[in-house]
Amino acid sequence: MQRKFFIRRLIPAITLFSFSLYSHLVAAQQTKESKIRRSGSTNALKITDLIAVKRNNLLTVQASFINESSSRIQYNYRFKWLDDSGIKVSDDEVWKPQSAFGGQTFELTGVAPTPMATDFVIELNGFG
Amino acid sequence: MSKLKIISILSVLTLSACATGPRYGGNVQYGDEKGVEQVTNEFGSTDIGMIAESMSSKMLQFPVIANSKTVVRMKLDPVKNATSEYINTKIITDKIRKVLINSGKVEFAVGDDGMQSQTNDLRTQNQTGLYDSKTTAKVGKMEAAKYRVEGSISSIVKRGEVKDVWYTFSLNLIDVQRGVIVWTDDKDIRKTSGR
């Protein structure tokens, strides 16, 4: 009787915990994704991790991706460095051409060119 | 309407059309100056941009610069071109210098190429008697560079069914007083194209 009562309470608790964990993960993914501006065919490049720290007074960012498709994807990327109000603090970087094999994980790293940068956006442009 | 009047009106209209601002048509197009350039596989603007951004950000993370409480003074030597192509290496050094200065952590002493203008300025201000001595730059107050930056670019070209070019750009930071290389790094670029 007591066991049944315990299971009856445990199931909703687990369900609630799973739902909250799922929501948290989705929110975290959305937050990471909000830092990416995509153009062209880059949907297969999924962001898996994002680290942004102030190192030596310069904002340093490392974004980890995985190519979820089975084919090679060619893409260009660049960082945009912004201040607190979202205004660009430096000229646009050059687009950097890269490619990722099917299933490959890779990191894009950037160091802000000026201490004024407190925020960033990663631009991804896929082609081919 | 007399012929003269018609000609006058047409002339005025033609001239005003010539004087107005933007015109459209023709074969000229402006492109994205930061876009990836793949016209040929020779050294191009994208390579220059990638090298300058990569090398300057790596140098800014070097502890001597990153942890310095004061602005580090350097001198930038021209980059040596050891490739078989003509490359205007001044563009690379100009871009590296721009990023380093804008970081607020580095400043550059006048290099060999600017020294003549610098000494001319000092001489003109101090020896011609043209300037108020209270406002002239004093001789003997120039600040020396603690570090010298030297760079070189080299390439390996292979031709088979495709043309493969591998560029490597290396940069050294030398402590002038001690004559020691204190930091070095490089950036490699591989470009392949059909022949």
Image (spheres, coloured by chain):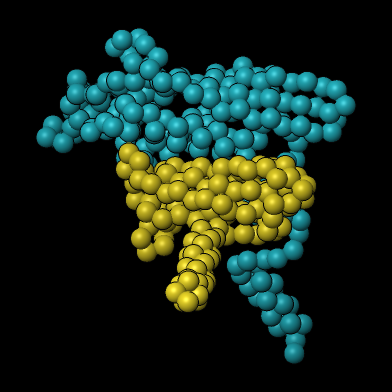
The x, y position of residue B152, in whole percent, is 54, 20
Taking B123 as reference, is A59 above or below it?
A: below
Residue farthest front in this picture: A1
In the rendered image, which quarter contains the C terminus of chain B? top right
Residue farthest top in this picture: B179
Residue farthest right in this picture: B161
In the rendered image, which quarter contains the N terminus of chain B? bottom right
Taking B187 as reference, is A86 above or below it?
A: below
Q: Residue at x 85, y 23 (%)?
A: B160
In the displayed structure, does residue A51 sit left or right of residue B91?
Answer: left
The x, y position of residue B63, in whole percent, is 34, 28
Q: Which chain is yellow?
A: A
Q: How many marks are shown on the rendered structure? A: 0
Q: Residue at x 39, y 34 (%)?
A: B60
In the displayed structure, does residue B44 sit left or right of residue B109?
Answer: right
The x, y position of residue A65, in whole percent, is 60, 48
Q: Residue at x 29, y 12 (%)?
A: B177
Q: Residue at x 73, y 45 (%)?
A: A102
Q: Work out whether residue A34 can be spotted.
A: no
Q: Which chain is cyan?
A: B
Q: Nearer the viewer, residue B29 or B163?
A: B163
Residue farthest bottom in this picture: B1
In the displayed structure, does residue A16 sit left or right of residue A70?
Answer: left
Q: Work out whether residue B185 can be spotted.
A: yes
Q: Nearer the viewer, residue B107 or B66?
A: B66
Q: Nearer the viewer, residue B124 or A40?
A: A40
The x, y position of residue B105, in whole percent, is 31, 36
